[in-house]
Amino acid sequence: MTFTPDNHPANEFFRLHRAHDIDAMAGLFTDDAMFRWVPFGGAGKGEVHVDGIKAWRTLMDAFPDLTNEILGMYTDDRGHAFCQVAISGTQSKDAFGVKNLGRHYRVEHMYIFHAQPDGMIDSIVSYWNHANFLRQLGTMDLSEIG
């Protein structure tokens, strides 16, 4: 199947993400799907159905109003979707080592999905400015950086 920005399963992923339907999100991925969250280096990669789902649950629990806005999506003829997405939410509890100060954030992300011809996603990669994320949550003072 040839995917376009209108029919790539990444659209359904982000719709379910907005709905906080993690079980349905998981159903979009192959059993052996892998994730990679580049800002976390080696600690930011693993199996979607093992560590990815746990991380999404923790994130949505700590940011109960978490949402996303697709700013742009491009596809190629090999099953990839390249998505510019703004993720935002207000922190309500400590998570991932970030102390809760009740602050709101909005950070643009770049996602790269790969879907098999049957529409199942087998990989997801995400990039974002983690320092900006921490600054918006009040846990990093960028004025100290030269």
Image (cartoon, grey):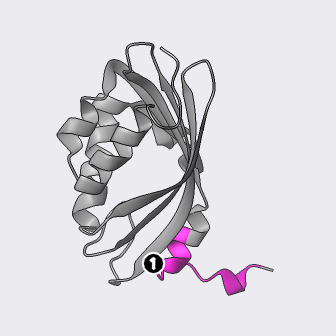
Classify 83 as above or below 68.
above
Q: Quadrant of the C terminus?
A: bottom right
Q: Quadrant of residue 88?
A: bottom left
| Viewer-closest of 139 and 37 | 37
Name the residue: 38% across, 64% down.
97
Mark 1 nearby-residue class (10 Å; few <14, some 14–19, many ≥20): many
Q: Answer whether residue 136 is magenta in the image.
A: yes
- The magenta span reads 133-145
Say which amino acid is labelled 1: Leu
Name the residue: 62% across, 19% down.
77
| Residue 25, horizontal then vertical, whole percent | 27, 38
Classify 8 as above or below 58.
above
| Viewer-closest of 124 and 75 | 75
Name the residue: 26% across, 33% down.
26
| Residue 80, horizontal then vertical, whole percent | 57, 27
| Viewer-closest of 73 and 130 | 73
Disc 1: which residue: 137
Q: Secondary structure at mark 1?
A: loop
